[in-house]
Image: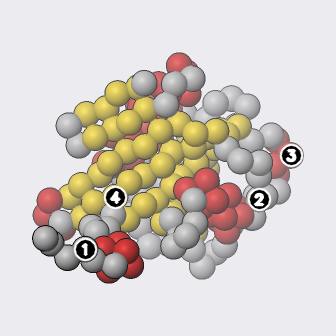
Amino acid sequence: MAKLLPEHEYLKSLPRKRAAAGVLFFNGKQDLLLVRPVYADHWKIVGGTVDAYESPLATCIRETQEELGLVVDPPRFLGVAYKWEQSKQDENLIFYFYQVLSDEQIGKIIIPKDELREYCFFSRGEAMKVVSDGSRQSFPFCYDAMESGKAFYMDREGGTVA
Protein backbone atom coordinates (compact mmCIF):
# COMPACT_ATOMS: atom_id res chain seq x y z
CA MET A 1 0.00 0.00 0.00
CA ALA A 2 1.30 3.47 -0.94
CA LYS A 3 2.39 5.72 1.88
CA LEU A 4 0.34 8.90 2.19
CA LEU A 5 2.14 12.21 2.38
CA PRO A 6 1.46 14.45 5.36
CA GLU A 7 -0.97 17.18 4.31
CA HIS A 8 1.60 20.02 4.45
CA GLU A 9 3.97 18.06 2.15
CA TYR A 10 1.14 17.23 -0.23
CA LEU A 11 0.06 20.88 -0.40
CA LYS A 12 3.65 22.01 -1.10
CA SER A 13 3.83 19.53 -3.99
CA LEU A 14 0.82 20.97 -5.84
CA PRO A 15 1.35 23.24 -8.87
CA ARG A 16 1.18 27.00 -8.31
CA LYS A 17 -0.54 29.63 -10.43
CA ARG A 18 -0.22 33.36 -10.03
CA ALA A 19 -3.38 35.36 -9.52
CA ALA A 20 -4.16 38.98 -10.28
CA ALA A 21 -7.25 41.13 -9.91
CA GLY A 22 -8.33 44.38 -11.49
CA VAL A 23 -11.21 46.82 -11.55
CA LEU A 24 -12.72 48.48 -14.58
CA PHE A 25 -13.74 51.88 -13.19
CA PHE A 26 -16.13 54.03 -15.23
CA ASN A 27 -17.33 57.60 -15.00
CA GLY A 28 -20.97 58.62 -15.51
CA LYS A 29 -20.44 58.71 -19.30
CA GLN A 30 -19.28 55.06 -19.29
CA ASP A 31 -15.69 56.05 -20.12
CA LEU A 32 -13.10 53.64 -18.71
CA LEU A 33 -10.46 54.84 -16.25
CA LEU A 34 -6.98 53.63 -17.14
CA VAL A 35 -3.68 54.30 -15.43
CA ARG A 36 -0.25 54.53 -17.05
CA PRO A 37 2.45 52.86 -14.95
CA VAL A 38 6.01 54.19 -14.86
CA TYR A 39 7.28 50.68 -15.69
CA ALA A 40 5.25 50.06 -18.89
CA ASP A 41 4.45 51.71 -22.21
CA HIS A 42 0.78 50.71 -22.20
CA TRP A 43 -2.19 51.80 -20.08
CA LYS A 44 -3.90 49.37 -17.67
CA ILE A 45 -6.84 49.05 -15.34
CA VAL A 46 -6.37 49.50 -11.60
CA GLY A 47 -5.21 46.24 -10.04
CA GLY A 48 -2.32 43.95 -9.40
CA THR A 49 -1.04 40.67 -8.05
CA VAL A 50 -3.08 38.90 -5.38
CA ASP A 51 -0.88 38.70 -2.28
CA ALA A 52 -0.54 35.51 -0.24
CA TYR A 53 -3.71 34.82 1.76
CA GLU A 54 -5.50 37.76 0.12
CA SER A 55 -8.72 37.39 -1.84
CA PRO A 56 -9.02 38.86 -5.36
CA LEU A 57 -11.71 41.24 -4.07
CA ALA A 58 -9.44 42.43 -1.25
CA THR A 59 -6.70 42.93 -3.85
CA CYS A 60 -8.96 45.26 -5.85
CA ILE A 61 -9.83 47.31 -2.79
CA ARG A 62 -6.16 47.52 -1.72
CA GLU A 63 -4.90 48.38 -5.21
CA THR A 64 -7.58 51.05 -5.62
CA GLN A 65 -6.40 52.72 -2.43
CA GLU A 66 -2.73 52.39 -3.43
CA GLU A 67 -3.15 53.52 -7.07
CA LEU A 68 -5.96 56.07 -6.81
CA GLY A 69 -5.97 57.06 -3.14
CA LEU A 70 -9.66 56.03 -2.94
CA VAL A 71 -11.44 53.82 -0.44
CA VAL A 72 -14.31 52.22 -2.36
CA ASP A 73 -17.16 49.85 -1.68
CA PRO A 74 -16.54 46.32 -3.01
CA PRO A 75 -16.81 46.39 -6.80
CA ARG A 76 -19.04 43.97 -8.73
CA PHE A 77 -17.57 40.73 -10.06
CA LEU A 78 -17.34 40.32 -13.85
CA GLY A 79 -15.39 37.13 -14.51
CA VAL A 80 -12.11 35.25 -14.65
CA ALA A 81 -9.54 34.89 -17.41
CA TYR A 82 -6.97 32.12 -17.57
CA LYS A 83 -3.80 33.36 -19.27
CA TRP A 84 -0.94 31.10 -20.28
CA GLU A 85 2.25 32.12 -22.04
CA GLN A 86 3.98 29.03 -23.35
CA SER A 87 7.18 30.92 -24.15
CA LYS A 88 7.51 31.94 -20.50
CA GLN A 89 5.96 28.79 -19.01
CA ASP A 90 3.74 31.22 -17.10
CA GLU A 91 0.12 30.87 -16.03
CA ASN A 92 -2.09 33.42 -14.42
CA LEU A 93 -5.70 33.70 -13.27
CA ILE A 94 -7.05 37.24 -13.59
CA PHE A 95 -10.22 38.23 -11.72
CA TYR A 96 -12.14 41.17 -13.17
CA PHE A 97 -14.49 43.52 -11.30
CA TYR A 98 -16.15 46.84 -12.14
CA GLN A 99 -17.60 49.95 -10.53
CA VAL A 100 -18.91 53.36 -11.55
CA LEU A 101 -17.19 56.24 -9.78
CA SER A 102 -19.08 59.38 -8.78
CA ASP A 103 -17.81 62.80 -9.83
CA GLU A 104 -16.91 63.38 -6.18
CA GLN A 105 -14.76 60.22 -6.08
CA ILE A 106 -13.07 61.15 -9.36
CA GLY A 107 -12.23 64.58 -7.91
CA LYS A 108 -10.43 62.88 -5.01
CA ILE A 109 -8.12 60.69 -7.12
CA ILE A 110 -4.47 61.00 -6.13
CA ILE A 111 -1.96 58.84 -7.96
CA PRO A 112 1.44 57.80 -6.56
CA LYS A 113 4.03 59.43 -8.85
CA ASP A 114 6.58 56.69 -8.08
CA GLU A 115 4.23 54.05 -9.55
CA LEU A 116 1.95 55.82 -12.05
CA ARG A 117 2.55 58.56 -14.60
CA GLU A 118 -1.07 59.56 -14.98
CA TYR A 119 -4.68 58.45 -15.27
CA CYS A 120 -7.26 59.20 -17.92
CA PHE A 121 -10.79 58.20 -18.95
CA PHE A 122 -11.11 56.59 -22.38
CA SER A 123 -14.07 55.68 -24.56
CA ARG A 124 -14.42 51.96 -25.24
CA GLY A 125 -12.81 52.26 -28.67
CA GLU A 126 -9.94 54.48 -27.50
CA ALA A 127 -9.21 52.20 -24.53
CA MET A 128 -8.74 49.23 -26.86
CA LYS A 129 -5.99 51.14 -28.70
CA VAL A 130 -3.83 51.89 -25.64
CA VAL A 131 -3.97 48.73 -23.52
CA SER A 132 -1.90 45.53 -23.73
CA ASP A 133 -2.82 42.61 -26.00
CA GLY A 134 -4.02 40.64 -22.98
CA SER A 135 -6.41 43.39 -21.93
CA ARG A 136 -7.61 43.75 -25.53
CA GLN A 137 -8.56 40.06 -25.45
CA SER A 138 -10.31 40.27 -22.06
CA PHE A 139 -12.16 43.58 -22.31
CA PRO A 140 -14.90 42.41 -24.74
CA PHE A 141 -15.82 39.67 -22.24
CA CYS A 142 -15.83 42.24 -19.43
CA TYR A 143 -18.16 44.54 -21.38
CA ASP A 144 -20.46 41.64 -22.31
CA ALA A 145 -20.62 40.53 -18.67
CA MET A 146 -21.46 44.08 -17.54
CA GLU A 147 -24.24 44.39 -20.11
CA SER A 148 -25.71 40.92 -19.56
CA GLY A 149 -25.24 40.78 -15.78
CA LYS A 150 -23.68 37.33 -16.24
CA ALA A 151 -20.12 36.42 -15.28
CA PHE A 152 -17.62 35.22 -17.87
CA TYR A 153 -14.83 32.68 -18.02
CA MET A 154 -12.11 33.19 -20.63
CA ASP A 155 -9.68 30.40 -21.47
CA ARG A 156 -6.80 30.44 -23.92
CA GLU A 157 -9.15 28.80 -26.44
CA GLY A 158 -11.76 31.53 -26.06
CA GLY A 159 -14.39 32.61 -23.60
CA THR A 160 -17.94 32.24 -22.55
CA VAL A 161 -20.38 34.37 -20.63
CA ALA A 162 -22.36 32.12 -18.33
Q: How is the image coloured?
A: secondary structure
User: Which label's residue is closer to the chain start, 2 or 3?
Assistant: 2
Instruction: Measure the alpha-carbon separation of dots 4 and 2.
Output: 26 Å
Residue 32 picture quarter: top right
Task: Give coordinates of residue 13: x percent, y percent.
Answer: 27, 75
Q: Residue at x 15, y 72 (%)?
A: 2
Q: Residue at x 34, y 38 (%)?
A: 154
Looking at this view, is 155 or 34 the one in front? 155
* Residue on which disc 2 sits: 70
How packed mark 1 is, by other alpha carbons closer than 10 Å (few <14, some 14-19, many 20 or more), is: few
Task: Give coordinates of residue 136: x percent, y percent.
Answer: 36, 41
Using the image, tell me which numbered label, if any, was put on residue 92.
4
User: Which label's residue is closer to the chain start, 1 or 4?
Assistant: 1
The residue tagged with tag 3: helix, strand or loop?
helix
User: Which label's residue is closer to the chain start, 3 or 1?
Assistant: 1
The residue tagged with tag 4: helix, strand or loop?
strand
Instruction: Measure the alpha-carbon separation of dots 2 and 1.
Output: 48 Å
Q: Amino acid at mark 2?
A: Leu
How packed mark 3 is, by other alpha carbons closer than 10 Å (few <14, some 14-19, many 20 or more), is: few
Using the image, tell me which numbered label, if any, was put on residue 4.
1
The residue tagged with tag 1: helix, strand or loop?
loop
Relative vertical location of residue 49 with respect to residue 79 in this rendering, above or below: below
Task: Give coordinates of residue 150: x percent, y percent.
Answer: 51, 25
Relative vertical location of residue 157 with respect to residue 72 in this rendering, above or below: above
Q: Nearer the viewer, mark 1 or mark 4?
A: 1
Instruction: Measure the alpha-carbon separation of dots 4 and 3.
Output: 34 Å
Q: Residue at x 67, y 44 (%)?
A: 75
